[in-house]
Amino acid sequence: MFGPNLFHNVGGCVAVILFGIGFSNLLLQKNLIKKIIGLNIMDTAVYLYLAVKGYITGRAAPIVTDGVQEVEAYINPVPSGLVLTGIVVSVSVTAIMLSLTIRLYRRYHTLDLDEISMRLKKEGL
């Protein structure tokens, strides 16, 4: 039914499913905290995908040991670097989004995006 390639690419399939869950959560939820969680799930899916695609079976981390300097003995370090950089950026973006959410809650006493939008229209902003 699924074929041999599905189990070979199970990490990529899980990443796509996670991305879909996060994206649907981002679109369908009205609560700002739940939207932030959906965005973080999407981030995690992208990091998982990069990690899965950057790993090559039978190769080691790109740290030269025992004098082995052939390129074929190591994995590509670029996806790992991208994942680490992305994690730092997503933590910063999440912190900013949460601080803005706190400010919105203090002003409007709700986290419902539709309610905040209605109040903004009433205020004329």
Image: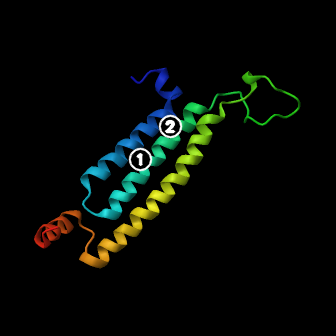
| Left/right of residue 67 with respect to residue 102 in the rendered view | right
- Quadrant for residue 35, please give it: bottom left
Q: Compared to 104, does 49 lie above or below?
A: above
Residue, x 47% and y 41% (percent of image)? 46
Circle 2 sits on which residue?
A: 49
Q: Nearer the viewer, residue 80 or 57?
A: 80
Calculate the distance from the C-alpha at mark 2 to the C-alpha at mark 1: 11 Å
Q: Compared to 25, does 32 lie above or below?
A: below
- Extreme-front residue of the structure: 125
Q: Position of residue 1 (x, y in %)?
A: 39, 22
Residue, x 39% and y 57% (percent of image)? 37
Circle 1 sits on which residue?
A: 42
Q: Which mark is residue 99?
A: none
Q: Position of residue 24 (x, y in %)?
A: 30, 47
Q: Position of residue 104 (x, y in %)?
A: 30, 72
Q: Position of residue 49 (x, y in %)?
A: 50, 37
